[in-house]
Image (cartoon, helix red, strand yellow):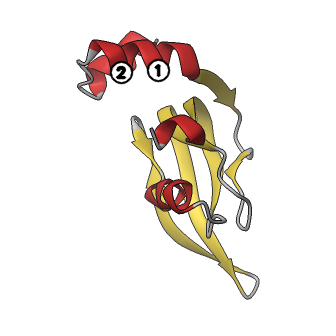
Amino acid sequence: MLDHVFRKLHITEEELKKELREKTSFSKHQKGEFLIKENKYIKVLKIVISGKVRVYQENEEREILIYYLGNMETCTLSLSACFEDCKSTVNAIVEEESMVLNIPVRFVND
């Protein structure tokens, strides 16, 4: 499955491919599962390989939709939280069964 990701994301550098094979994992998530929770530190960067994920904020008991993630997409807000080592400002919940590539944040910064 990782070779499919390499093709879709146009990853050609062999050293990067090797590192991704060694340091990443895939996980399957069902509808209603949280991938990201507001006010939690992001420890793993998640790339949606297939499925659909809703990213939103909660404000005064209301949900404010930010965007949906689809195939080969990641949450840009969680990406910025990774680099700044701060808490997430959004929630991300699975809308359709999803396959996710998990990259530990400590390797994203390298």
Observer-nearest of 27 and 54: 27
Q: Kindly identify the residue that appears in the image at 56 percent across and 23 percent down.
A: 24
Quadrant of the rendered image containing residue 25:
top right
Report the side of 109 relative to 59 (left or right). left
SS for dot 2: helix
Vertical position of residue 70 compared to residue 24: above or below: below
Observer-nearest of 65 and 84: 84
Q: Kindly identify the residue that appears in the image at 63 percent across and 64 percent down.
A: 88
Q: Quadrant of the C terminus?
A: top left
Residue hosting label 1: 20
Q: Residues within 10 Å of mark 1 (few under 14, many from 20)?
A: some
Residue type beneath disc 1:
Leu
Q: Residues within 10 Å of mark 2 (few under 14, many from 20)?
A: few
Residue type beneath disc 2:
Leu
Task: Give yes or no for contact between labels 1 and 2 (Cβ–Cβ under 8 Å).
Answer: yes
Q: Position of residue 3 (x, y in %)?
A: 37, 11
Q: Position of residue 52 (x, y in %)?
A: 52, 43
Quadrant of the rendered image containing residue 11:
top left
Q: Kindly identify the residue that appears in the image at 49 percent across and 68 percent down.
A: 66
Q: Position of residue 65 (x, y in %)?
A: 53, 70
Vertical position of residue 75 compared to residue 57: above or below: above
Q: Position of residue 13 (x, y in %)?
A: 25, 18
Q: Which mark is residue 16?
A: 2
SS for dot 1: helix
Mark-to-mark CA distance, 1 and 2: 6 Å
